[in-house]
Amino acid sequence: MKNRNTRALVESGMMIALAWVLHSIRIFRMPQGGSVTAGSMIPLIILALRWGPKWGMGAGALYGVIRNLMDPFVVHPVQYLLDYPIAFGALGLAGFFRKNPVLGTAVGIGGRLVASVISGIVFFASYAPKGTPVWQYSLVYNASYLVPEVIVSGIVVWLLSRTEVFRPQTERP
């Protein structure tokens, strides 16, 4: 058991680092935050699929904290929680869908979308164009970069799920 936890902890650190590197390769950046990256959520989703939702949520939340430390943007403590540890921790929801990794990818990134939309509604309503419902603005804004991310991530996770290296830890000897 100790060896298994050590292995999960080491792999978590590696995946968090890889997620940061991939986050640094931005394909498109939104004006008020958010970006399409080179698949920065994929390592955290793979971690959740391999080790389960507990490890995935923990590593995702830690990644969110690190991401905010490296690129800070906080207007309120609750906004910080929603946009960083909760949003990235939600990627760990993928771990509940080990038998369907693409669905897990969509659910994990969908969880991140929900946290970001709530944050947008509560803390960034002033950015919504006059006459546009705040919830609609927040949903469209956040979906504009997370939908491309879920498509790219889903394809990559699907391709990787077909390899032996990707097998969940519970299936390995």
Image (tube, rainbow, N blue to C red):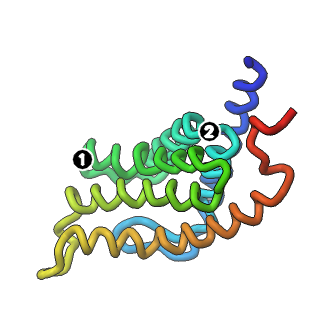
Asked which quadrant contains residue 92, the reply is: top right
Answer left or right for 167 relative to 127.
Answer: right
Contact between labelled residues 2 and 1, with CB atoms less than 8 Å apart: no
Q: Amino acid at mark 2?
A: Gly
**Residue 83's x, y, as percent?**
37, 52
Instruction: Give the Cα distance between marks 1 and 2.
Output: 31 Å
Q: Is residue 17 visible?
A: no
As drawn, the residue found furthest toward the top would be: 2
Between marks 1 and 2 in the image, the one whose residue lies nearer the viewer: 2
Q: Is residue 144 among what the camera can see?
A: yes
Checking the image for residue 50, the label placed there is none
The quadrant of the picture occupied by the N terminus is: top right
Q: What amino acid type should be assigned to the residue bearing mark 1?
A: His
Q: Position of residue 20 (x, y in %)?
A: 60, 53
Tell which circle, 1 or 2, labels the residue nearer the N-terminal end. 2
In this rendering, the answer to whether 123 lies above or below 11 is below
Q: Residues within 10 Å of mark 1 (few under 14, many from 20)?
A: few
Occupied quadrant, residue 105:
bottom right
Q: Badge 2, how many Cα within 10 Å: few under 14, some, many 20+?
A: many
What residue is disc 1 on?
76
Q: Which structural element holds mark 1?
A: loop
- Residue 151, percent from left and from top: 58, 72
Q: Secondary structure at mark 2?
A: loop
Left/right of residue 33 with respect to residue 102 in the rendered view: left
Nearer-the-camera pick, 44 or 22: 44
Q: Residue at x 62, y 71 (%)?
A: 152
Say which residue appears at 75% left-offset and 25% top-offset: 4
15 relative to 28 in the view: left or right: right
Q: Position of residue 144 (x, y in %)?
A: 42, 75
* 127 or 132, nearer to the observer: 132
- Report the residue at 71% width, 64% height from top: 158
Q: Which residue is mark 2?
A: 52
